[in-house]
Amino acid sequence: MITHWRRVLHAGVMIEIEHEELVDACEANVRRMLAHCGLE
């Protein structure tokens, strides 16, 4: 399914974060997601 979205969305529209990466560095990745959405 993710392959489909990689093909149809323009670069930079979507960020990918592996579950393990999110668990290991939760705060940093939440900040990264918020920044991607233009939020603080």
Image: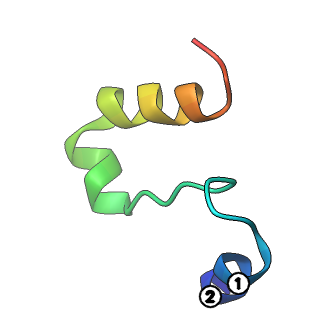
Decide if residue 28 is on the left or right side of residue 1.
Answer: left
Q: How is the image coloured?
A: rainbow
Quarter in which the C terminus is drawn? top right
Residue at 76%, 69% in the rendered image: 9
User: Which image quadrant is residue 36 in?
Assistant: top right
Residue at 73%, 65% in the rendered image: 10
Decide if residue 36 is on the left or right side of residue 22.
Answer: right
Decide if residue 21 is on the left or right side of residue 3.
Answer: left
Looking at the image, the residue that sits furthest to the left is: 24
Q: Is residue 29 above or below residue 31?
A: below
Which residue is the site of mark 2? 3
User: Which image quadrant is residue 25 in?
Assistant: top left
The label shown at residue 17 is none
Residue at 79%, 79% in the rendered image: 8
Question: What is the C-alpha distance between the residues marked 2 and 1?
Answer: 6 Å
**CB contact under 8 Å: marks 2 and 1:** yes
Q: Is residue 11 above or below residue 38?
A: below
Residue at 69%, 54% in the rendered image: 13
Decide if residue 34 is on the left or right side of residue 23.
Answer: right
Where in the figure is residue 12, as x and y percent of width and height? Answer: 61, 54
Judging depth in this view, the residue of 5 and 11 nearest the camera is 11
Q: Does dot 2 land on a helix, a strand or a loop?
A: helix
Quarter in which the N terminus is drawn? bottom right
Q: Amino acid at mark 1?
A: Arg
Which residue is the site of mark 1? 7
Q: Closer to the observer: label 2 or label 1?
A: 1
Where in the figure is residue 20, as x and y percent of width and height? Answer: 27, 59
Where in the figure is residue 32, as x and y percent of width and height? Answer: 44, 33
Where in the figure is residue 11, as x and y percent of width and height? Answer: 63, 63
